[in-house]
Image (cartoon, helix red, strand yellow):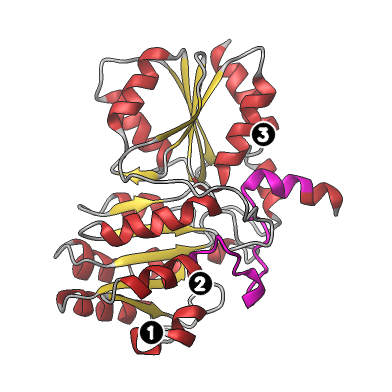
Amino acid sequence: MKAIADKNACFGGFADASLYGSEALTARSYGKALFELAQVDKRIVCLGADLTQPTETGLMRDNIADRFVMLGIAEANMIGVAAGMARCGDIPFTHTFCVFATRRCYDQVAMQVAYPRTNVKIVGFMPGLTTPLGVSHQAIDDVALMRALPGMTIIEPSGPDQIHAAVRAAAAWEGPVYLRLPLASRQVDDAAPLRGLTIGVGEILRQGKDIAIITAGVTVACALRAAELLAPDLDATVVNMHTLKPIDVTLVKQLASSHRALLTLENHSTIGGLGSAVAEVLALSDLNPRFGMIGVPDMFAEGGSLPYLMAKFGLDPASVVLRARALVT
């Protein structure tokens, strides 16, 4: 158990996906951030699909009941209701697991949110491999689906210290937003200072000169650890690309012109996600750095613990180090 706990620390304190009770709602939780913002902005309403505890919306239900709507296991209907509320001037936040928020009700998201550009915030939990529930719940294609929708903004904060800023940015953004969040965990440092987030502006967490590792969400901590392991052989820049769409084109071009190689690292399929977004920027520019992608390959994953799955698919620090060295040498 000690070894697993140490590995979990590489994933930003989000690894304990079994915490469905109120004890999981740490001071850095999404639920607390939404509740605090809703107390200030009366337009914010909370919609759920029978997953109140894992989506951390109990504070809204228990304290602002007139702005909490439970739709049951009916995600498509929830999106339709949210679109109607947005047209009436509300700022609805819908909540379910990532795989249900995207794949299950994609047509409703496209036709009632993206096409009319209604001011709906779609909040998905358990992205990629961060679920203990296996393939049926692993959203390894959600970013690809949402990136394809015109006008959809996608935000994935790097950890608990950036959730408050992500919620505020989503609420202030006029138009559809998809917020990609892992479940809360006890492994959170509530003493760490909160960090900001500006939509469309990537965040350089570590400055290097040889290779730039571009990542988001739960893999940010692993990228930072990999950068430590690479030194002093390779000097790695680590970028938290918390906005997956619109991606920071200027920053990607700057990194491509100042580094020997670029490597993307994502908790998602390598098709249509962060790696694809960076590759598109490079393909449409006159820059040609060495380039690699780490993520889930063109296959379904499997059930298992987060440390096991991350190691299996090469999303752990040791694997990132090997890939980075191979890319540069």
Q: Which residue is mark 2?
A: 55
Disc number for residue 317:
3
Q: Nearer the viewer, residue 265 or 8?
A: 8
Left-right relation of 46 to 311 = left
Badge 2: few (under 14), some or many (20 or more) residues near its Cα, within 10 Å?
A: many
Q: Quadrant of the C terminus?
A: top right
- Camera-near label (2 vs 3) is 2
Disc number for residue 68:
1
Amino acid type for the residue under numbered disc 2: Thr
Q: Mark 2 or mark 3: which comes first in sequence?
A: 2
Left-right relation of 125 to 43 = right
Q: Which residues are magenta?
A: 6-30
Between the C-alphas of marks 3 and 1, the distance is 41 Å
- Residue 130 visible in this rendered orientation of the protein: yes
Badge 1: few (under 14), some or many (20 or more) residues near its Cα, within 10 Å?
A: many
Q: Which quadrant of the structure image shows residue 171?
A: bottom left
Between the C-alphas of marks 2 and 3, the distance is 28 Å
